[in-house]
Amino acid sequence: MSKKIIASFTVSRLEILDEQGRTDAELMPDLTDDDLVRLYELMLLTRQFDQRALHLQREGRLGTYPSVLGQEASQVGSAYALQNSDWLFPAFRELGVFVTLGYPLAEIYQYWNGDERGLLCPEQLNIFPICIAVGTHIPHAVGAAMAARYRGDPIATACYFGDGGTSKGDFHEGLNMAGVFQAPVVFIIQNNQWAISISRNHQTAAETLAQKAIAYGIPGIQVDGNDVLAVYQATREALQRARSGGGPSLIECETYRMADHTTADDAARYRDPEEVQRWQRRDPLLRMRRFLADRGLWDDARQQQLETEIDARLDRAVAREEATPPARARDIFAYTWTEMTPRQKRQLQQLRDLRELDHG
Amino acid sequence: MAEMNMVQAINLALREELERDPDVVLLGEDVGRDGGVFRLTEGLYEAFGEERVIDTPLSESAIIGVAIGMAAYGLKPVAEIQFLGFTYGAIEQLFSHAARLRSRSRGQLHCPLVVRTPYGGGVKAPELHEESSEAMFCHMPGLKVVVPGSPWYAKALLQASIRTPDPVLFLEPTRLYRLLREDVPAGDLPVELGKARIARPGDSVTVVAWGSMLEKSLRAAAGFDAEVIDLMTLNPFDAETILASVRRTGRLVVVHEAAQTGGFGAEIAATVAEDAILSLKAPIRRVTGCDVIPPLPLLEDYNVPTAKQIAGAIAEVLAF
Ligand SMILES: Cc1ncc(C[n+]2csc(CCOP(=O)(O)OP(=O)(O)O)c2C)c(N)n1
Ligand SMILES: [Mg+2]
């Protein structure tokens, strides 16, 4: 008879770029100077898009909007490791991922303006529609990964969700299935410390979210989610492992939701402003800018020029969105089934008769 | 007596029940410190503490499952789900357990649980925030489905729901949360689950509505000698009040926000066809949402019946 340790586990955390902009040369990912600048530019684009969206919302020109302020590195860094053939399964707060993959900006505004035509994904991108029911898309990413492997496609799927999403049954069921079948999927947790008013510590008694991988027999790692280089490196490794038959992985990006949950929320009701200030010092853009400046890749003039360029690009995107002809009543029927039913046709006719609607 | 909107009336009902009965507990996402995403539970965490107003992790299935365990043990949990569309992940708990605990235990156990959730459109939010799938829940015997149409009735019906020994799905019309104000007194209000009420008497046509469509139906009825019935409890529903009215008026219009096909209006129409068809002077008319996935905000209104549409249907049956 005995009582002995039969298994023990460790959880690692990856940090490459610190708050002062210094890096660990040994851990540096294999990126060119152009890549490094590009990462920063994408983060800045994400931030300015986000600020513009908040502004439009206040002016009544956009619907309820979830800001990604503070999460730029977690999103841009991970998405930058994706290849065009990989498939993305986003939650709803993935602006930085969309921007990095080249999703048209006007369409992103359009979606948040309550127009489902914004969900129409451009042909060349493999992006599943935004998932509003938290965590419920996790099994889909596993299934698509299994299907890709069955077809012999050397791709991976990437599934994004929040710290709150890890509490859903679908998280457990999806990760378990992925482990059993060694599906080529990478789960990327945007741990921004909050799920509306529920803090990370109230979401789970586990010390890290990364360690949840252990129970499913898959690799898990925590990264400094405000360190774009660490996020990129961890995601790249996990995607390569998945694409080459090494199975699924879980990445916990530890970051922070700097803004309210959405424009309909007031975080002052439930969280300490000092906590927000502490995270302010860990701003993901600031440290990357310092790093680039130290390498001679960035200066104030370039910063100003880029900000102006992005502003002009956002002006064009907003103008394009606002010039889009209104959606037609027919659109609410057209995609229910392959074909409209006779009853739906009658309902559409009644709408037109009664409401003197458009004739689309 | 204080004039209040439905949010305040529901908050008052919860506060009074928490005060009255130590077995009552609230649980759900953001119901505590934040006071609920619609502020329905505002101030209750501060007043009753974290053991009775429980902020849960993000897991609807666990919220309802845990509430079932609490209810079977003897508590009276009131679970909040942020939107009806998010109960879908907990349907197994609702249908396979809450609805049948009494049956499965041959009457030994029961499940005095209330699941409160907003339903229907009105806040212009993303997908799954405007579901009106009440008929689906009415198709599960063992579950009661209750839908208030005004602040007074919201308070009365919620108190009755908390006190009934059966599990109740309590659907709060999002559209009405802050739209109507009414005098709502403190203390117990007389109302019985399973009974409809005549919200407006009339003699030439019966209009049956509930929740989000009641206010529009009353507006539509204003120009006619129309009787408006507020159904209030959808399952088990009060067929007698509807039949008695139709036998008098000879005409029936049923209004709901949910899709037409398989909607609860079909059950009412079938009941009238079975038991009062000889009293009918005109075909039955349904005014409903379309057979579509509820659209995102820009097109949301296309899918929601208007008072004008309801008035049109009333005029149509009156023409017979
Ligand atoms: C199944 C489900 N329940 C509740 C909600 C309402 N809701 C929207 S976002 C959110 C919190 C999500 O937290 P997290 O997963 O950490 O993502 P974050 O908002 O922080 O990006 C909640 C409760 C929802 N959308 N889906
Ligand atoms: Mg979160």
Image (spheres, rainbow, N blue to C red):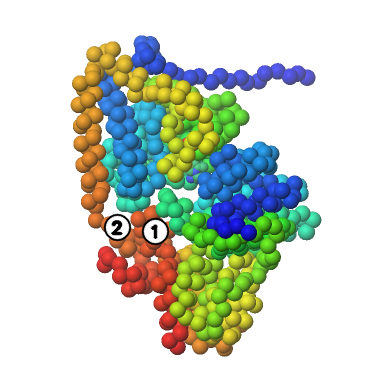
Distance, label 2 to label 1, CA atoms, is: 11 Å
The quadrant in which residue A54 appears is top left
> Is B57 left, or right, of B97 in this rendering?
left
**Residue nearest the observer in this picture, B140 or B5:** B5
Q: x, y (%) of residue A237? A: 40, 24
Residue A330, quarter of the rendered image? bottom left
Decide if residue A251 is on the left or right side of residue A2.
Answer: left
The answer, for residue B147, to whether it is visible in the render is no
Three-letter amino acid code at disc 2? Ala
The residue positioned 43% from the left and 50% from the top of the image is B125
Q: Residue furthest right?
A: B108
User: What residue is shown at x 56% (from left), y 57% (from top)?
Assistant: B4
B216 lies above or below A309: below
Taking the image as drawn, is residue B212 in sight? yes
Residue holding disc 2: A327
Q: Vertically, is A72 above or below A314?
A: above
- Mark 2 element type: loop
Q: Nearer the viewer, residue B138 or A215?
A: B138
Near-viewer residue (B85 or A284): A284
The percent position of residue A92, horizontal first and vertical second, equals: 41, 41
Classify mark 1 as within 8 Å of ligand 1 or not, answering yes or no: no
**What chain is tagged by disc 1?**
B
Assign the C terminus of chain B to one quadrant of the image.
bottom left
Instruction: Find residue A195 and report its horizontal and vertical position in percent.
Output: 51, 37
The reply to whether callout 2 and callout 1 are in contact (CB within 8 Å) is: no
> What residue is at 35 percent from the left and 44 percent from the top?
A57
Which residue is under mark 1? B300
The three-letter amino acid code for the residue at tag 1 is Glu
Looking at the image, is B299 positioned above or below residue B199?
above
Mark 2 belongs to chain: A
Q: Residue at x 59, y 47 (%)?
A: B41
